[in-house]
Image (cartoon, grey):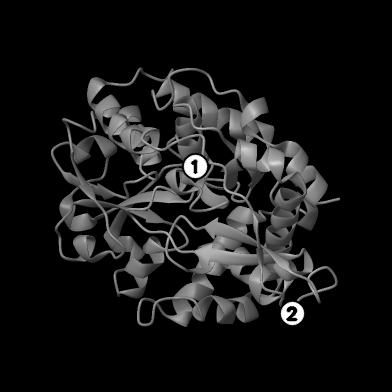
Amino acid sequence: MYRSLKPGFLVLMLLVVAMLGACSTDSKPAATPAAAGAGGAEGEGQSLTKVKIQLKWVPQAQFAGIYAAKEQGFFADEGIDAEIIPGGPDIVIEQQVVNGAADVGVTGVDSLLVSRDNGLPLVSLAQISQKSSYRLIAKKSAGITDPTQMKGKKVSTWFGSQQFQVLAFMEKNGLDPKKDIELVKQGFTMDQFFNDQVDVATATIYNEFHVVLESGVKESDLDVFNIEDAGVGMLEDTLIAKKDWVDGNRDLAVKVTRAILKGWNYAIDNQEETVDAVMKNVTEGSTTREHQVTMLEEIAKLIRPEGFTEQQVGSFVDESFTRTADIALSYGLIKKAANLDEALEKSIYEDAVK
């Protein structure tokens, strides 16, 4: 039985909601013609339609499918000139999409549901990752072998729209994230963790966890808490767009989705080549090729897990969405039960994979 949300948790939610709620919901980003460019059958010899795609983080293999779609000409094949916009710890993806700074965004399903619960007219076009990647990690020297021992400790996680799973984990283990822990904003790097500025840090299995291991820390020197195993793992990367943009640009929404899904299947099947494309976009000195190879290997397992066919990449698994929505409601992320029929534009995905 899940417990109700504590007041301190609501305060944290309201900080994010305030940012999102300040956005106008009347803005309707329109696709605009771009200069003609080389591309496939549909893109060649004609103007391409500009589409802005907002990432939830900095350029890396987490978004390899989007970079592969651009590198391999899949966007151009659909008549699209895709502008890929990097994200970061201070970027609220939903705000970018609602305001028209981006047409399509990548965000977590939990964040999408929170945004919709607060009136933002956003929908999912396709579900990219199929399970949670989040871990909480502590050095053995911190003596945290049980989540309850995080009480009174400094715990870092990403803010903006990516903290909800961590907050739910605290609630699940009887900790008020406002009173029982010191919640610290986590940045781009794991320096806070390395320098003992925090006791517990958030890590994804495809990125920060391996950053720590690559630094020379042994897995046996860590206590690792799996958010999925704790029962509060929520679906992560999903493609979102503003509802009226989808309604007014339905064919374009299908084409963008089709290009990205094709890009993901290509990335998973051609990982070495795709990492080369990713490395062209990363900030110089911010990562290594070896790390991006590992990241793509791990993210591929989340996007096309064992048993998934190419056509199932991006699909909506009802059971997973229901679980995510139930957790969001049980822990007070949302105030009313999510209407998944309205939140998921399943027909876009279905048409994209025809």
Decide if residue 105 is on the left or right side of residue 143: right
Nearest to the observer: residue 318 or residue 253: 253
Crowding near the residue tagged with mark 1, few <14, some 14–19, many ≥20 C-alpha atoms within 10 Å: many
Q: Secondary structure at mark 1?
A: helix
Nearest to the observer: residue 1 or residue 337: 337
Q: Looking at the image, which residue is at 73% across and 37% down? A: 346
Instruction: Name the residue that disc number 2 marks.
Output: 38
Q: Looking at the image, which residue is at 59% across and 44% down? A: 241
Quadrant housing the N terminus: top left
- The answer to whether one can see residue 174 in this image is no
Image coordinates of residue 212 in percent, x first then y, are 32, 67
Crowding near the residue tagged with mark 2, few <14, some 14–19, many ≥20 C-alpha atoms within 10 Å: some
The image quadrant that residue 331 belongs to is top left
Q: Is residue 102 above or below residue 69?
A: above
Give the numbered dot on residue 315. none
Whether label 1 touches label 2, CB < 8 Å: no
Q: Is residue 311 above or below residue 71?
A: above
Nearest to the observer: residue 235 or residue 216: 235
User: Disc 2 residue type?
Assistant: Ala
Image coordinates of residue 231 in percent, x first then y, are 46, 33
Q: Is residue 228 above or below residue 18?
A: below
Image coordinates of residue 8 in percent, x first then y, are 22, 26
Q: Looking at the image, which residue is at 70% across and 53% down? A: 257
Decide if residue 274 is on the left or right side of residue 15: right
Q: Secondary structure at mark 2?
A: loop
Give the numbered dot on residue 98. 1
Q: Earlier in the sequence, mark 1 or mark 2?
A: 2
